[in-house]
């Protein structure tokens, strides 16, 4: 859906957890939820290219906890460039939503290369919005972020629980479509558990994701990786 369409804001919890916690949550989720049908052997690799401007607007808004903020990224899965999405994530009052538009590999590469005039006539409102922000706000590709995700879904409440780990950074490299791009561990990055739902979170999921001493946080993979370039 393009940026102009009405979009539901979803609740989101984000927790930094240990690998031992990951094993616990994985076992609980397998007992009560379903694996995402798009996953292979229960997981997939995500590669994202994040955008920011010369003043690091997206990074600073995240670090400062600005109430209304947004970030743009291009993303694909398992290093398969046949399905690429441009995404805009928006946060407002702690709730989140995401807008998405498809890109071809050629279009994604042209954006990386700074060849953007075609975007204004793309017929996709989100692509046109990114064009305006690249042209007039100086937004540009900043760094590649890789990680592994284990996703689970639960129908009531439209719940999605994800376990993200092995977060890696391209060290400022933006050669997003290069399968040989070398990424390195983004420091001592934790495992990230995210829980997202619409109007209500069923008790069975609420109980399954509880961990002793685990509090909702605001970890950013992009911010973690920007430390390194």
Image: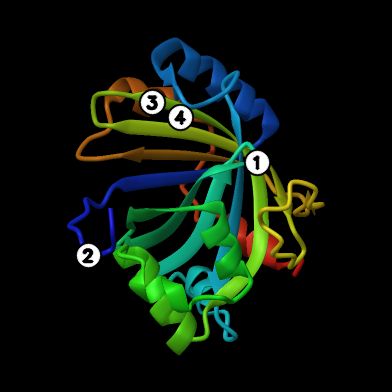
Whole-percent x, y for residue 215 in the image: 49, 45
In 3D space, how far apart are the residues under numbered discs 2 and 3 (Cα atoms)? 27 Å
Question: How far separated are the C-alphas under marks 3 and 1?
Answer: 23 Å
Q: Which mark is residue 4?
A: 2
Asked which colour scheme the image uses, the reply is rainbow
Badge 2 marks a residue whose secondary structure is: loop
On screen, 213 above or below 74? above
Residue 153, labelled with which disc?
3
Residue 192, percent from left and from top: 57, 42
The residue indicated by pointer 4 is 210
Left or right? Give the position of 169 relative to 196: right
The relative height of residue 47 versus residue 214 in the rendered view (above or below) is below
| The C terminus sits in image quarter | bottom right
Q: Please report whichever mark, 4 or 2, sits nearer to the chain's N-terminal start.
A: 2
Label 4: few (<14), some or many (≥20) within 10 Å?
Answer: few
- Alpha-carbon neighbours of circle 1 within 10 Å: few (<14), some, or many (≥20)? some
Between disc 4 and disc 3, the foreground one is: 3
As measured in the structure, the alpha-carbon distance from the residue carrying label 2 to the one carrying label 1 is 29 Å
Residue at the top extreme of this rendering = 31
Q: Which numbered disc flags the more N-terminal residue, 4 or 3? A: 3
Asked if the residue under mark 3 is in contact with the one under mark 2, i.e. CB atoms within 8 Å, the reply is: no
- Residue nearest the observer in this picture, 15 or 109: 109
Give the image location of residue 31, x and y in percent: 45, 10
Left or right of residue 222, residue 121 in this image = left
Query: Which residue matches tag 1?
Result: 79
């Amino acid at each position: 859906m393009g940026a102009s369409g009405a979009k539901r804001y979803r609740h989101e919890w984000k927790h930094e957890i240990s690998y031992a916690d990951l094993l616990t949550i994985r076992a609980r989720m397998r007992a009560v939820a379903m694996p995402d049908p798009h996953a292979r052997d229960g997981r997939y690799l995500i590669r994202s290219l994040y955008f920011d401007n010369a003043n690091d607007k997206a990074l600073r808004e995240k670090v400062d906890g600005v109430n209304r903020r947004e970030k743009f990224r291009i993303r694909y899965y398992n290093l398969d460039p046949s399905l690429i999405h441009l995404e805009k994530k928006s946060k407002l009052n702690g709730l989140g939503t995401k807008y998405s538009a498809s890109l071809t590999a050629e279009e994604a590469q042209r954006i990386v290369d700074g060849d953007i005039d075609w975007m204004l006539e793309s017929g996709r409102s989100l692509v046109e919005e990114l064009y305006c922000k690249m042209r007039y706000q100086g937004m540009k590709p900043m760094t590649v972020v890789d990680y592994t995700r284990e996703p689970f879904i639960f129908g009531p409440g439209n719940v999605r629980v994800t376990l993200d780990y092995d977060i890696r950074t391209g060290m400022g490299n933006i050669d997003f479509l290069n399968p040989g791009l070398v990424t390195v561990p983004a420091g001592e990055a934790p495992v990230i558990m995210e829980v997202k739902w619409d109007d209500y979170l069923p008790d069975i999921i609420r109980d399954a994701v509880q961990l002793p001493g685990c509090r909702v946080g605001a970890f950013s993979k992009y911010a973690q990786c920007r430390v390194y370039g």
